[in-house]
Each structure stands twice: as C-alpha cells, then as structure tokens.
C-alpha cells in the first residue's frame, strides 16, 4: 500500500531499469527529483521474464516510491497555517515570528485590517412589552 505523496503534484519518471520521481512545490511548482533507484533482478539466475518480472518491478517500484516520498519530506517545508508543502524559496523564515510560514500566508498576515464601514453604531432601541432592549 502506497502512502499519500508529500506534495499535491508529483510525477513518476521511472523506466524499466530504474525508478525516479519528481515532487513539485505546492506554491510555485518547482520540481525536486529523487535519486535514481535501480531495478534489480540480480538475485535470480536466469533473470525472470513476463509476469514474474512485472510483479518484481511493481514491488520494487512501490518500495522506491515510499523511500523517495520519505526523503522528500525533508526537502519541503510544511506551512502550519495552510498545510501546504513548499520549497525553500517559497518559505518565509522569520527570526521574530513564533512560527515560520509560506510566502502566501505571510502576505495575508501583513495586510492591514480592513476598515469597518460602521465603526460607531448607535444601538437600536425596540419596545417589547414596555421594556427597552438594546
């Protein structure tokens, strides 16, 4: 069973000889390639053919994906506000902030608060059964 990918978008560029994956930043889309994992049938003499080879390839493919996915967790930063995994260029590390966040969340937090249209609202008085309710 394969686990959920680290980033929302990833590409499998595996061939019949090796396995490799590209994980892309959730913000800018910059890709990060995993290392190549060789498909190995050297334990068998003669090398398997047909369905046995396909079964071995799928099994090693899943193992290589799990390994590449685990390694990609260290290459991408997790934003605690929006939950995205972003590259180092899209991540804002601030010495004075409590937590480090992605550039989009930083921009949202830096916006000045919107001015309320009715800052001073007069209370509305109603009469219900002779009592005033504000």
Image (cartoon, rainbow, N blue to C red):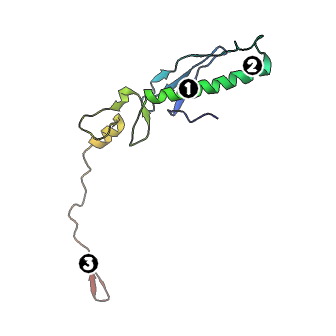
Query: At numbered mark 2, what does the secondary structure look like: helix, strand or loop?
Result: helix
- Observer-nearest of 88 and 55: 55
Locate the N terminus and report the quarter of the image it occupies: top right
Q: Nearer the viewer, mark 2 or mark 3?
A: 2
In this rendering, the answer to whether 122 lies above or below 44 is: below
Q: Residue at x 52, y 21 (%)?
A: 34
Query: At numbered mark 3, what does the secondary structure look like: helix, strand or loop?
Result: loop
- Give the label on residue 67, or none: 1
Q: Position of residue 8 (x, y in %)?
A: 51, 34
Q: Position of residue 87 (x, y in %)?
A: 41, 28
The residue indicated by pointer 2 is 53
Classify residue 83 as left or right of residue 59.
Answer: left
Is tag 2's residue or tag 1's residue first in the polypeptide sequence? 2
Is tag 1's residue or tag 3's residue first in the polypeptide sequence? 1
- Observer-nearest of 44 and 101: 44
* Residue farthest toward the left in the current orientation of the protein: 120
């Amino acid at each position: 069973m394969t686990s959920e990918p680290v980033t929302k978008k990833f590409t499998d560029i595996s061939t019949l000889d090796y396995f490799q994956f590209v994980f892309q930043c959730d913000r800018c889309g910059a890709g990060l390639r995993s290392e190549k994992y060789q498909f190995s049938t050297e334990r068998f003499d003669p090398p398997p053919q047909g369905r046995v080879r396909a079964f071995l390839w799928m099994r090693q493919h899943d193992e290589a994906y799990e390994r590449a996915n685990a390694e990609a967790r260290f290459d991408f930063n997790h934003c605690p506000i929006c939950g995205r995994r972003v590259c180092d260029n899209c991540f804002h590390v601030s010495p004075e902030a409590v937590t480090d966040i992605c550039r989009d969340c930083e921009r949202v937090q830096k916006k000045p608060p919107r001015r309320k249209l009715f800052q001073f609202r007069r209370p509305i008085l109603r009469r219900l059964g002779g009592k005033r309710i504000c």
